[in-house]
Image (spheres, rainbow, N blue to C red):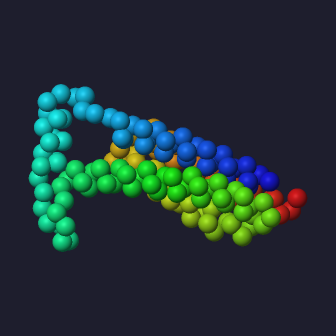
Amino acid sequence: MKTTIFLRTASIVALLQYSAHAVLFLSTSPKHGPEEIALIDTMKSHTWNFAGSIHSYWDFYFGYGMLAILWGLIEVVLLWQLATLSKPDPLRLRPVIFLIFIANIGHAVLTLKYFFLLPAIFDFIIAALLGFAFIGAKKDLKM
């Protein structure tokens, strides 16, 4: 039962994280003056042929932001589904829980290096909850 609770809680924390990312990413506009606006305009206007398609730096920037939202949504749903699947046999899910744990640690490290602290805190909280779910999966069988 503990595994289910930890996975559901991790799913809710991930929902908060990626909802905030989606809202901020999709609603933010330049606020740092003409240099920022010029940079964004340049990112949008310079295009080149990349692997047979014409793209700009803005396409990559915006596309990666949208991918982060998509993968975040997938993580939310996956964690919720794993919580349901953990009820009858939590031990079988330990490899999947461990994989998502490692992914969140990796995401946190990259976020700290290339972005900022707040999203990394969410990743570390999710990773901690997944660590508890991983440990709890073994204990849930003994109950």
Check the picture and name the quadrant holding the N terminus: bottom right
Quadrant assignment, res 96: bottom right
Please give left or right for residue 68 compared with residue 62 in the image.
right
Residue 73 visible in rendering: yes
Check the picture and name the quadrant holding the C terminus: bottom right
Which residue appears farthest toward the right when viewing the image?
A: 143
| Horizontal and vertical percent position of residue 42 | 12, 45
Q: What residue lies at 24% left-to-right and 33% top-to-bottom?
A: 30
Above or below 115: residue 56: below
| Horizontal and vertical percent position of residue 4 | 73, 54
Above or below 45: residue 100: below
Please give left or right for residue 120 compared with residue 1 in the image.
left
Please give left or right for residue 11 compared with residue 24 in the image.
right
Q: What residue lies at 58% left-to-right and 43% top-to-bottom?
A: 13
Q: What residue lies at 35% left-to-right and 50% top-to-bottom?
A: 65
| Horizontal and vertical percent position of residue 39 | 15, 41
Residue 125 vs residue 58, the one in the foreground: 58
